[in-house]
Image (spheres, rainbow, N blue to C red):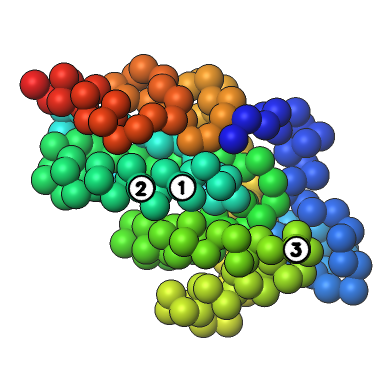
């Protein structure tokens, strides 16, 4: 999915704040009422963003996927190529697989904040699978209020309760940390579309499974 990267400061601020789309409620990203929109982490620093990794952490071959939870091409990849890569390369400990989010829009960031709420890779990848499998459903219509409610519904199925969801969606510092992390990753690795892949430092666009297998087999030896 080729879209202009949202790397300008103004674009980033708008994505994080979601300013004013429903004045009668707290913003679904910051969760804060008017007057508290500039809340910061207690120590003035942003929280650390944890890498979400599958497979062998010490594998000689590393695959980094850059994807957006709102990207239909990413959903197709996870329904097809990813399952084969997981079975043949991740579950067999042949590669280290890293998933990094790209934030083209607010719903993608909201989904990520929920997925990363526990900092648990098992929960993250399980919820990510649900997001992709039901992408059309939770994004249907495009109404931000409905999207947030659909995300909450999915998260409850995954095991989160209202308190955990409220905490996840009201974590302004984490939203800022995630967006800053995304910007740095995208600029460093030259990411302009999703899904994109960095295999041992080399950038690739979306591929068929046989193309992936050929590249991985050559590097694994």
In the image, residue 162 lies at what x, y percent?
58, 82
In the image, residue 69 lies at what x, y percent?
54, 51
Q: Look at mark 3 in the image and give the residue it sits on.
A: 141
Q: Quadrant of the N terminus?
A: top right
The Cα–Cα distance between marks 1 and 3, rounded to whole angstroms, is 20 Å
Q: Look at mark 2 in the image and give the residue it sits on.
A: 80
Report whether 133 appears left or right of 72: left
Quarter location, residue 147 = bottom right
In the image, residue 173 lies at what x, y percent?
63, 52
- Pick the front one: 38 or 142: 142
In the displayed structure, would residue 219 be above or below residue 120? Answer: above
- Pick the front one: 103 or 75: 75
- Pick the front one: 88 or 49: 88
Report helix, strand or loop for mark 1: helix
Q: Look at mark 1 in the image and give the residue it sits on.
A: 76
Sequence-first tag of 1 and 3: 1
The Cα–Cα distance between marks 2 and 3, rounded to whole angstroms, is 26 Å
Marks 2 & 1, CB-CB < 8 Å contact: yes
Report helix, strand or loop for mark 2: loop
- Pick the front one: 72 or 68: 72
Report whether 68 appears left or right of 44: left
């Amino acid at each position: 999915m080729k879209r202009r990267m949202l790397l300008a400061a103004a674009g980033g601020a708008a994505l994080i704040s979601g300013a004013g789309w429903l004045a009668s409620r707290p913003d679904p990203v910051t969760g804060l009422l008017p007057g508290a929109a500039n809340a910061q982490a207690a120590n003035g620093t942003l929280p650390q963003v944890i890498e979400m990794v599958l497979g062998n952490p010490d594998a000689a071959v590393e695959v980094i996927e850059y994807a957006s939870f709102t990207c239909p091409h990413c959903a197709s990849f996870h329904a097809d190529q990813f399952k084969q890569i997981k079975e043949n390369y991740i579950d067999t400990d042949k590669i280290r697989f890293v998933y990094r989010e790209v934030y083209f829009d607010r719903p993608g960031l909201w989904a990520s904040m929920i997925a990363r709420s526990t900092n648990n890779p098992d929960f993250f990848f399980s919820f990510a699978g649900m997001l992709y499998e039901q992408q059309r459903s939770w994004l249907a219509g495009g109404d931000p209020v409905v999207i947030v409610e659909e995300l909450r519904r999915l998260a409850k199925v995954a095991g989160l309760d209202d308190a955990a969801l409220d905490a996840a969606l009201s974590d302004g510092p984490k939203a800022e940390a995630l967006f800053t992390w995304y910007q740095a990753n995208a600029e460093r690795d030259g990411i302009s579309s999703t899904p994109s892949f960095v295999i041992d430092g080399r950038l690739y666009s979306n591929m068929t499974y046989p193309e992936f297998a050929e590249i991985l087999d050559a590097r694994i030896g």
